[in-house]
Image: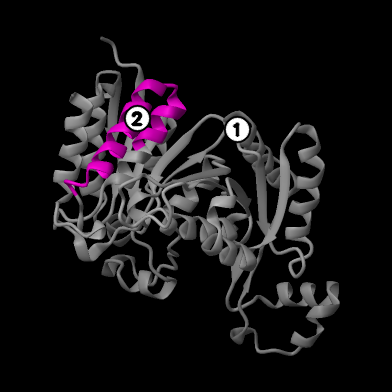
Amino acid sequence: MSKKYKIAVLPGDGIGKDVTDAAMKALDAVGFSELAEYKWGDIGWEFWCKEGDALPERTIELLKQSDCCLFSAITSKPKEEAEKELIPELQGKDLIYFSPIVRLRQLFDLYVNLRPCKAYPGNPLNYRDDLDLVVFRENTEGLYVGIEWHPVPEGVMKTIIENHPKAKRFEGANLNDVAISTRIFTRKGVKRILKASMDYARDFGYPTVTVVEKPNVIRETSGLMIREARKLVQEYNNLELWETNIDAMAMWLVKNPQNYGVLVASNMFGDIVSDLCAQLIGGLGFACSGNIGDNFAVFEPTHGSAPKYIGMNKVNPIAQILAAKMMLDWLGEKEMAKKIEEAVATVILEGKVRTYDMGGSSTTSEMADAICEKLKA
């Protein structure tokens, strides 16, 4: 059988290799590997330290030649710490670490970060068994756009002070003592993440879409998103728009999460609220996500690289396996995707195999093997 799909695989750092191996086992067991050509690529902390680039150009080229990407986890550290870990030959060359996954999102315009947070019965960590939340996070703009200064250039500070009355109080400040991060929204960016969330709610039968922002304080950026949401929802019959502030949303998700279905938020607020939702269904070991654009997508677990667990075969691989399931859905391999999710759900319900985060002692590979046994059966 000729290969149908070209899949880039980027295990990244830390536990990335362990959980990627687990996902690859599941893809083999469900029969997808017979349709796929896998290309493994370099990304992460190792390449920052020895090359000064956590996302080498060769990896970007690999992705451009692929249909989509299965990604895992990376290590990220603050600017000063990252500089210190470069090899001696690269230190002092003004190299600045920038998150490779953020670069990928912007480079390939993966504007939708789709994070399903679904509770599987039998998981002892579930807040409630009836939760089925989906977070749409704008992925390319907002506070994570990366336009920042420290120290602040004199021209930048002067322009801000001259053009905004509330900036006058910073006039005369020592520019070495000032740091500025920008939060940039565009109407295009706002409209397309809102449309993606409302299309999803319509297609999968969710009655509401909740916009999670802070327009009472962050009036212009959050305000733009709210105004566009109110206009756009009029195009959807029987879909109700709810509006909440990010701080209140955190409280209500703890109080009555079953009242919500599809949530949509800007980059940072979406990052925050999706981790909260993940904890409601057991933690980051169960939380997968898709970075999705019009023509390309990168699928990943939402957890980090957990360097303290490197090589211990200990962590929960379910988030990575569900990320592979999301990839199959996006490729149109719906039946395979359904089988993987059913296998995961069955293993969780039976409770015979549980990793440490679930209160058990099963290893990463034992969890993967248990899921694969269900797939083969």
Provide the secondary structure element on which disc 1 rests. Answer: loop
As drawn, the residue found furthest toward the top would be 1
Q: On the image, numbered disc 1 is attached to which residue?
A: 205
Q: Quadrant of the N terminus?
A: top left
Q: Position of residue 184 (x, y in %)?
A: 69, 58
Picture quadrant where residue 27 is located: top left
Q: What's the magenta region?
A: 324-353
Q: State yes or no: residue 341 in magenta.
A: yes
Question: Label 2 to label 1, Cα distance in Å?
Answer: 31 Å
Which residue is depicted at the point 76% across and 39% down? 233
Numbered disc in front, either 2 or 1 = 1
Q: Quadrant of the C terminus?
A: top left
Residue 125 position (above or below residue 39): below
In this rendering, would 220 be left or right of 261?
A: right
In this rendering, would 26 be left or right of 205?
A: left
Q: Residues within 10 Å of mark 1 (few under 14, many from 20)?
A: few
In this rendering, would 355 be left or right of 89?
A: left
* Amino acid type of the residue tagged 2 in the rendering: Ile
Q: Position of residue 341 (x, y in %)?
A: 34, 34
Q: State yes or no: residue 360 in magenta.
A: no
Residue 240 position (above or below residue 251): above
Q: On the image, numbered disc 2 is attached to which residue?
A: 7
Q: Residues within 10 Å of mark 2 (few under 14, many from 20)?
A: many
Q: Position of residue 70 (x, y in %)?
A: 35, 38
In this rendering, would 14 be left or right of 131?
A: left
Provide the secondary structure element on which disc 2 rests. Answer: strand
Whether residue 66 appears in this view of the structure is no
Q: Position of residue 14 (x, y in %)?
A: 25, 57
Nearer-N-terminus badge (2/1) = 2
Viewer-closest of 351 and 99: 351
Viewer-closest of 181 and 276: 276
* Amino acid type of the residue tagged 1 in the rendering: Gly
